[in-house]
Amino acid sequence: MIAITINSANSLQLSRRSFLRVCAAAAGGLLVSLYLDLPLVAQEGGQPKPQVYPPDAFVHIKPDGTILITVNRLEFGQGVQTSLPMILADELDADWSQVKAELAPAADVYKDPLFGIQFVGGSNSIAHSFEQYRELGARTRAMLVAAAAEEWKVSPSQCHTEASVVYGPGGKSATYGKLAEAATHQSIPATVQLKDRSQFRLVGKRVPRLDSRPKCNGSLKFGLDLDIPGMKTAVVAHPPVFGGRVKSLDDKTARGVEGVRDVFEIPLVRGTGVAVVADKFWIAKQARDRLKVEWDLSAVEHADSAQLSAKYKALARTPGNVAVSRGDQKALDAIAPENRMVVEYEFPYLAHTPMEPLNTTIRFAGDRAEAWVGSQFQTVDQTAIAEVLGLKPEQVTFHTEMAGGGFGRRAVPDSHVQREAAVIAKRLRGVPIKLVWTRENDVQGGYYRPMHVHRVEIGIGRDSMPSAWRHVIVGQSMLAGTPFAAMMVKNGVDETAVEGTADTHYNIPNFHVSVHHPTPNVPVLWWRSVGHTHNAFVMETLIDELAARAGIDPIVYRRKLLRADAGKLRRALDLMDEKSASWRTTLPKGHALGISCHESFGTAVACAVDVSVENNRPKIHRATIGLDPGVAVNPLTIESQFQGGIAFGVTQLMAKGAITFKDGRVEQRNFDSYTPPYINDAPTAVDVHIVPNSEKPSGCGEPPVPVISPAVVNALARLTGKRYRSLPLVSI
Amino acid sequence: METYKLTVNGQPREVTVDPGTPLLWVLREELKMTGTKYGCGIGACGACTVHLDGVATRSCVVPVSLVGNRPIVTIEAMAEDPVGRVVQDVWVSHDVVQCGYCHSGQIMAAVALLKSMPKPTDTDIEESMGGNLCRCGTYVRIREAIKAASLQLR
């Protein structure tokens, strides 16, 4: 997901309206340009410019009292389809039992209030839309009250609301359902009074998800479940090396499969491929597997993990582009060798593998088109589809489909899946085309969390605290070549590569971080919690090691080292300390405690785990989490996000948790060779504790992920005496 | 192409497909029952789990030609199943799902477990649910929900 945080130390410095352009040379000499109109807001305090959103685009109250609330984000598990309606319904004084939610199509009004594109990323759905949805609710309520007051010929101030009913003087009352029509004729108030937070009725409550039942009985339709009359399914053969091109194609056998409608070469964002269109998925896949394609792989670099590792390690020994330089750079050299340590870390490429394989459905009708996409990036994907089809974005009706996970994989700056689908739909004008990426396409299709090497030199002061720190990070830039590069790649430093290290909350006086961004031929992408995935691992294992070396309790050590102003982290750490105290001190033999804490996307998280070793793998018996997310809109959702995010983070520790390359080819194909955590690998229990805080809310989707893997290996270090600096964790 | 007579959720159905077509795609594309999900196609993630003659089975790796006369039960029938109904209700009351995509398969696996083992231990749960992948990581709540369903079914 995108790690754009307005409130980070490196605040965005951009004109309010900036037109950014990215060009990607697509196959066939076609130059694809994507124009994004990003009204990036770098205003004081990171607050969006006050904007009056029209309630009718977000709230539809039916005569029977049903309140349909439109959600301006993709729902893909994070619970925004429940939490955003809660925020609106609270200010509206709605009867929650009558509230339903729907996902918004792509449209200007649904763009993120701060970033000016419609998307999910950076864990900011609630952070950015909290005030927006409150105001929408308050405005709608004001219009309903005004309608009632007008009918009753009283002042609105004489009316009050509760559970979808307006009450007036003299025992008068009217339901929202009855008032809805009249309310639409009221003018939209320019300003509204929001509730005092003590008056919240829904916000802060453990409200169950609105979409559970249809997800439990098989009735909920995901993008992959779409069935449109006349629809055909397309499956694509991609080149075995990124950027490869079809040299020759023998499709005779493939065309012989009954139900195949068309086979043809298509341009890809990188190279060319072969599309097979058939009546059904299974037919298309059978035909694809019978294609005989000779590929031209001569003009593209063949990435190789072993070679990349050697190259990255050599680079890490040289200073890179400076991300942060504080204090005296030479302080390290003045420290006696016995008080210095030099360590090297290595992290592999990681695939997201959301459970619902990637897919996109498009029907092209010449002068317009319709698209159905489980998209984290509606504005970008709609623009890309329009471009391929020779249309304007507004000529593409873009439906946001429910998505089976995403973790960043459905927010792709080059929209390569949507472009593939559009190319196919353009050829088969009038026919709805559902492009399905098989799991093999997904695992081998690129757009991975980049591989990284870190090299860190630390000098330890007399107080056992790190006094000098020199840190070199090597890894591809995720943002180079995207519309986000202009704001987030500065002086050769991609902020997402150093986040979690460069902006550490630890107080290290002489602190120097630099970065190299090699450019191997591997497409990379944000993976839930982005740069924090590797940076938190490095920082939290090193801090733990320093604490152990000093013989100081890891919680006490962190508390001593945290900056005085790291209030959220201190509170999270204190809460975790308190809640884990009972089990931490009574661990069975063969079990060990692991600690970590990390702040990302504005949310501070502290983690304690109880780990033993079973069958040469870490067995995580328990995790206790303390977190400070500001206002906790839905503590139930937050609990789920943390339990789930912790399990997602375990991906990094899996023996087969790596994408590797040999001679340009991905060595993994499916879940048999790239294996994320199953129930046995995830913690048996996760208890989540939220610091009470009335500050504005921060994100909860990504912040759980970074803490778990360092906590687990910190526990392993206590059990085995070894430090783990290379992932995946092939052996213990 | 061959014609097959199947019994799906107690109803007789007839499909004409290539004999190698996996049961998953027969359900999804021929019978338009999309509750059963495609996740990997190699039997490694469990999203496609159905009951074949009462046994939790990966429908993505069972060719329709091998189904024979064994009854097929899918997620769509769970609301009518005495154990299935309890499991679905507990799944909802425990707020188990996130994206929800894998949960047709999770619920089918959990129902099969509870039918064969009404009081599963943590180890039983890990063994029976151990092949059902959830990328959202809802595992903790799956465990709790299965235990709660077990209590309710006693």
Image (spheres, rainbow, N blue to C red):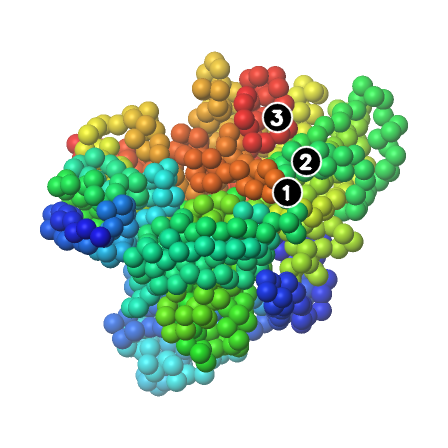
Height in image: B52 above or below A124? Answer: above
Q: Residue at x 48, y 55 (%)?
A: A249
Identify the residue under disc 2.
Answer: A307
Residues at discs 2 and 1 in contact (Cβ within 8 Å): yes
Local crowd at mark 2 within 10 Å, few (<14), some, or many (≥20)? few
Question: In this view, which residue lies farthest toward the top?
Answer: A589
Name the N-terminal-most of marks 3 and 1. 1
Residue A26: x %, y % from top left: 60, 63
Residue A163 or residue A689, whichever sits in front: A689
Residue type (three-letter) at the residue carrying disc 3: Tyr
Local crowd at mark 1 within 10 Å, few (<14), some, or many (≥20)? many
Residue A185: x %, y % from top left: 39, 85
Residue B151: x %, y % from top left: 22, 33
- For numbered disc 1, what is the local secondary structure? loop
The label number, if any, that marks residue A303 in the structure image: 1
Residue type (three-letter) at the residue carrying disc 1: Ala
Identify the residue under disc 3.
Answer: A724
* Mark 2 → mark 1, Cα distance in angstroms: 8 Å
Residue A723 or residue A478, whichever sits in front: A478
Q: Is residue A527 left or right of residue B141?
A: right
Q: Chain of mark 2?
A: A
Q: Residue at x 39, y 33 (%)?
A: A679
- For numbered disc 2, what is the local secondary structure? helix
The label number, if any, that marks residue B132 in the structure image: none
Q: Chain of mark 3?
A: A
* Mark 3 → mark 1, Cα distance in angstroms: 26 Å
